[in-house]
């Protein structure tokens, strides 16, 4: 939550998920990425990142930053990551 | 960048230049970084020399560009591998059968060409995803449901061509059965339309499948005879309501009449949604685990679920051996009457008990929407990916899986026999053994078992699992059970088992392949069908 709060302070729209990215994908990202590639950042488990990465590929985006953390939620490590248009490699 | 097999580096470079001219430079992908995206994330050969990988990819945005790509491929004899969205993980993803193939990525062909709300059909291109079609229907306010697989991020065309299934009424949940008409770019670049689509200005392309003369649509599914560029689908009108009810039966042998009655109800159209079989005693997938006493009894008897001790335990505890949840779509009065009728029929089994389940008037309220298994309401979902995540009950999730999915007869006897056979095999191969598995009910007339084989990033483990997988294919075939679909790594092995009359079926496929695609450019090896110049070298 601290991560999300900090991002929100920078003016970024934030979304909470509970493992399932369907709502985020259908109501936000799908429409946004269909118009144009838009960078997103997140702190999630592997599963949501796996899905978002593959969906992003279809819109010319890549995971340009990924880091596994020692912090775990429900026995699962968290990853911080950034998905951005292909040319914006970090 | 490694050129396709049999193609020189110069020819490949020339071909890529021509492809850039055909589709635009930004839609030809040849860098290692771009091509890596087409790897199969669940490849059983992950990181090994035998992993099937593409040489490059090209993404046309229309039929004319597909024709140009096919013609260039013919000129240079470049193997191409069409994908729609390439997300059939567990059955191969977007990686080709033949390493070095050029992936023909149809994701840009994502137009929804027609949705008919009066006769409930759609005509779409291959890059249209289930999410795209669902959104379109929602935005138009049509009272139509699409039958989606789970997960629902793939495409109607790709899933149906691979014989995928969903969750609605039987006439829709067999996705290839529910298609009506297709457009195909043939290996020579010519465009073909099937069914009524062969009639210029036809007004019934999505209404009548067969047109006139031999019906050839099946030749383009699980196949490599063309590039499907349009396909029609029948959609399900939104029903008034949805109802479920569960019957439980007490004894081991009750599975046999339970399945027979279920089959009668489905084949009669009384139960018209996808039913679910379970075992309150034995637990299993998506059910609570068995009681520790049950586990101990199973260990004592070597997994014999018919042991007198286990039967006595079930009787003493009042734990049913089996359950069946039947489901209904339709008008409220109709589905309530159908559930009452189903109860009458199941009452023929002594000791049968009934429990009312879910009941929703449709459309779902926002609260209901959050709670339901969305594919059963025609809603695409990615929730299944969160189920497989690491958790207290799944502490070591694998990197992926491949599906072993044999078709077996729709009888209780076959379910019991298949469990004995597969449990014994699993023990012999050192695979995890479930206490008992029940089949899925995607298809009306047959059962299908779907077992997930773990894929890891450990070469030795994957090698062992591949060998076990191939042995299971053979063991299943020896009992008359065949795979309905499999990942490219095993398609030759499965096709080998369909061997009636000295492989007459495969020889027929090969005869057609040679006639239609003499250069063997399209999806070489897909479903065990190889072009002449590669035949016998890959299987």
Image (spheres, rainbow, N blue to C red):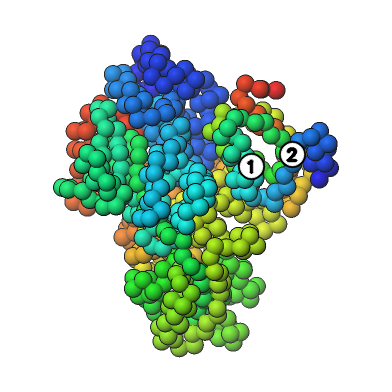
Q: Residue at x 41, y 72 (%)?
A: B271
- Residue tagged by mark 2? A13
Helix, strand, or loop for circle 2?
loop
Labels 1 and 2 share a subunit? yes
Q: Chain under label 1?
A: A
Residue B339 shows in this picture: no
- Residue tagged by mark 1? A28
Q: Quadrant of the C terminus of chain B?
A: top left
Residue B514 shows in this picture: yes
Q: Position of residue B166 (x, y in %)?
A: 45, 56
Q: Residue at x 49, y 32 (%)?
A: B38
Res B189 quadrant in image? top left
Q: Position of residue B371 (x, y in %)?
A: 62, 62
Q: Position of residue B507 (x, y in %)?
A: 20, 42
Q: Residue at x 39, y 74 (%)?
A: B270
- Badge 2 density bin: few <14, some 14–19, many ≥20, Cα 10 Å: few
Residue B147, above or below B455: below
- Badge 1 density bin: few <14, some 14–19, many ≥20, Cα 10 Å: few
Res B435 quadrant in image? bottom right
């Amino acid at each position: 939550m601290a991560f999300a709060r900090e991002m929100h302070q920078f003016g970024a729209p934030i979304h909470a998920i509970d493992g399932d990215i369907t709502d985020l994908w259908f109501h936000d990202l799908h429409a946004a990425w269909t118009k144009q590639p838009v960078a997103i950042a997140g702190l999630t488990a592997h599963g949501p990142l796996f899905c978002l990465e593959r969906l992003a590929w279809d819109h010319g985006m890549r995971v340009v930053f990924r880091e596994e953390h020692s912090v775990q939620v429900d026995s699962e490590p968290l990853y911080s990551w950034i998905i951005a248009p292909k040319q914006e490699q970090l | 960048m490694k050129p396709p097999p049999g193609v020189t580096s110069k020819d490949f470079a020339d071909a890529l230049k021509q492809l850039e001219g055909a589709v635009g430079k930004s839609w030809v992908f040849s860098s290692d970084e771009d091509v890596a995206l087409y790897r199969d994330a669940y490849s059983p050969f992950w990181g090994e020399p035998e992993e099937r990988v593409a040489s490059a990819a090209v993404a046309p945005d229309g039929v004319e560009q597909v024709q140009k790509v096919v013609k260039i491929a013919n000129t240079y004899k470049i193997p191409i591998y069409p994908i729609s969205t390439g997300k059939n993980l567990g059955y191969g993803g977007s990686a080709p059968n033949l390493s070095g193939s050029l992936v023909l990525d149809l994701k840009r062909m994502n137009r929804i060409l027609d949705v008919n709300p009066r006769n409930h059909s759609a005509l779409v291109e291959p890059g249209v995803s289930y999410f795209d079609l669902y959104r379109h229907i929602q935005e138009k306010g049509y009272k139509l449901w699409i039958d989606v697989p789970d997960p629902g991020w793939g495409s109607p065309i790709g899933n149906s061509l691979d014989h995928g299934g969903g969750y609605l009424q039987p006439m829709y949940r067999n996705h290839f059965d529910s298609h009506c008409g297709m457009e195909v770019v043939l290996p020579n670049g010519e465009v073909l339309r099937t069914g009524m689509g062969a009639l210029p200005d036809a007004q019934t392309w999505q209404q009548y499948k067969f047109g006139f003369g031999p019906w050839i649509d099946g030749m383009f599914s699980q196949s490599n005879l063309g590039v499907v560029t349009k396909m029609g689908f029948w959609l399900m009108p939104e029903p008034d309501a949805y109802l479920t009810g569960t019957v439980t039966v007490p004894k081991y042998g009750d599975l046999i009449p339970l399945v027979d009655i279920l089959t009668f109800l489905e084949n009669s159209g009384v139960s018209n949604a996808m039913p679910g079989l379970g075992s309150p005693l034995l637990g299993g997938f998506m059910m609570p685990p068995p009681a520790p006493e049950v586990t101990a009894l199973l260990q004592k008897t070597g997994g014999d679920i018919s042991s007198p001790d286990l039967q006595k335990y079930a009787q003493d505890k009042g734990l049913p051996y089996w359950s069946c949840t039947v489901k209904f779509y339709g008008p409220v009065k109709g589905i309530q009457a159908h559930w009452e009728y189903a109860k009458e029929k199941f009452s023929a089994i002594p000791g049968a008990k009934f429990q009312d389940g879910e009941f929703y008037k449709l459309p779902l309220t926002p609260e209901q929407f959050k709670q339901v298994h969305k594919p059963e309401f025609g809603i695409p979902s990615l929730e299944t990916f969160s189920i497989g995540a690491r958790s207290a009950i799944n502490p070591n999730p694998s990197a992926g899986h491949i599906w072993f999915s044999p078709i077996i007869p729709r009888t209780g006897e076959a379910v019991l026999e298949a469990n004995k056979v597969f449990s014994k095999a699993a023990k012999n191969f050192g695979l995890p053994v479930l206490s008992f598995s029940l089949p899925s009910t995607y298809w009306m007339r047959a059962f299908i078992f779907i077992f997930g084989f773990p894929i890891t990033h450990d070469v030795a483990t994957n090698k062992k699992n591949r060998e076990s997988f191939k042995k299971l294919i053979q063991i299943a075939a020896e009992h008359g059970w065949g795979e309905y679909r499999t990942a490219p790594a095993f398609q030759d092995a499965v096709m080998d088992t369909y061997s009636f009359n000295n492989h007459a079926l495969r020889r027929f496929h090969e005869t057609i392949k040679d006639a239609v695609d003499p250069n063997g450019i399209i999806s070489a090896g897909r479903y065990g069908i190889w072009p002449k110049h590669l035949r016998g070298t890959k299987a």
